[in-house]
Image: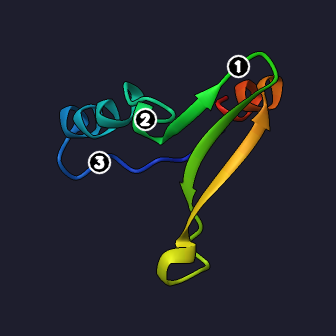
């Protein structure tokens, strides 16, 4: 059993809030650099770093990339 308080603004406000996130893409096309049968290369931000090192590039195996989107 789960206890949840009623939302302050009502159920419509909660639905509007959640709907903003349910239809978003897991990764935007502009972050994808390349892809082929062996892997997917993408750009990401490492928030633990500052300056130009914050932007990084990563290549994942195709199956690993698909699993990470779930």
Callout 3: SS = loop
Q: Residue at x 43, y 35 (%)?
A: 28
Distance from label 1 to label 3 (Cα)?
A: 46 Å
Q: Nearer the viewer, residue 43 or 67?
A: 43
Identified at 28% across, 31% down, the residue is 15
Does residue 56 lie above or below 40 as drawn?
Answer: below
**Which quadrant of the view contains residue 40?**
top right
Q: Position of residue 19 (x, y in %)?
A: 31, 30
Q: Quadrant of residue 10?
A: top left
- Which element type, helix, strand or loop, lies under badge 1? loop
Name the foreground residue: 69 vs 6. Answer: 69
Provide the residue designation for mark 3.
Answer: 7
Q: Nearer the viewer, residue 26 or 41?
A: 41
Measured as percent of width and height from the top left, residue 57 is found at 63, 53
Marker disc for residue 28: 2
Between discs 1 and 2, the one toward the N terminus: 2
Residue 25 against residue 48 in the figure, above or below: above
Q: Position of residue 32 (x, y in %)?
A: 52, 35
| Relative side of 23 to 16, left or right | right
User: Which residue position holds label 1?
Assistant: 36
Q: From the image, which quarter does the N terminus lie in?
A: top right
């Amino acid at each position: 059993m789960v206890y949840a308080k009623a939302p302050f603004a009502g159920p419509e406000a909660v639905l509007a809030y959640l709907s903003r996130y349910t239809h978003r893409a897991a990764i935007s096309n502009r972050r994808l650099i390349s892809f082929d049968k062996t892997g997917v290369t993408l750009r990401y931000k490492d928030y633990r770093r500052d300056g130009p090192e914050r932007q990084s590039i990563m290549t994942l195996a195709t199956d690993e990339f698909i699993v990470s989107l779930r």
